[in-house]
Image (tube, rainbow, N blue to C red):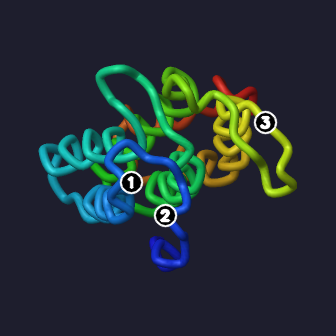
């Protein structure tokens, strides 16, 4: 699920703390959460590692983090799945770029809207979200979160 976490050059992405280990550490904590309290704490850590939770903003480091949240939502334990879906909903739908980071350069050097990139990354998770929505071991809230996010993404 997180096998390629160390392959990401986290330090190359602007992020709130400037600590390149913050995002992978928070994602690991969420993936390994086995209680509601651990998952809730990890959820907050993820949102604060990629942005400012209380401000409802994110930095460009959110882009690679979204893929891992999708993996956790599809393959994680009960609480990890639920809180990964909560984080994805916040980041893809409710949050917005941190002021000053609304535009980023893509791989070709073209300026693109970060919010659009984040929404597109969320939409690419549709197969994982569909998998998360129908897992037989889901609690009803987790399945509903996955279905709601798919609906928000138009999938």
Which residue shows up at 85% across the image and 44% down it? Answer: 110
Query: Tag 3: Cα neighbours inside 10 Å, few (<14), some, or many (≥20)?
Result: few
Separation of marks 2 and 1 at Cα, in angstroms: 33 Å
Q: Which residue is mark 1?
A: 137
Q: Residue at x 50, y 48 (%)?
A: 14
Residue 25 sits in quarter: bottom left
- The picture places residue 36, in percent across and down from the top left corner, at 17, 45
Q: Earlier in the sequence, mark 3 or mark 1?
A: 3
Task: Give the residue number, with chain letter if any, for mark 3.
Answer: 112
The residue sitting at 59% across, 46% down in the picture is 129
Mark before the other along the chain sequence, 2 or 3: 2
43 on left or right of 140:
left
Circle number at residue 37: none
Badge 1: residue crowd in 10 Å (few <14, some 14–19, many ≥20): few
Of the two numbered discs 2 and 1 on the same chain, state the one appearing first in sequence. Answer: 2
Q: Which mark is residue 10?
A: 2
């Amino acid at each position: 699920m997180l096998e390629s976490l160390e392959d990401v050059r986290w330090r190359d992405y602007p992020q709130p703390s400037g600590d390149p280990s913050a995002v992978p550490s928070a994602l690991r904590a969420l993936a390994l959460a086995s209680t509601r309290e651990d998952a809730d704490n990890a959820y907050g850590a993820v949102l604060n590692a990629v942005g400012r939770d209380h401000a409802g903003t994110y930095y460009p480091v959110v882009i690679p983090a979204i893929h891992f949240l999708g993996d956790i939502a599809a393959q994680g334990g009960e609480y990890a799945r639920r809180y990964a879906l909560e984080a994805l909903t916040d980041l893809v739908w409710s949050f917005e770029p941190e002021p000053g980071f609304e535009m980023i350069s893509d791989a070709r050097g073209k300026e693109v809207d970060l919010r659009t990139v984040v929404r597109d990354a969320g939409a690419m998770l549709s197969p994982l979200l569909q998998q998360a929505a129908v897992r037989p071991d889901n609690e009803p809230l987790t399945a509903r979160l996955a279905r709601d996010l798919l609906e928000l993404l138009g999938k």
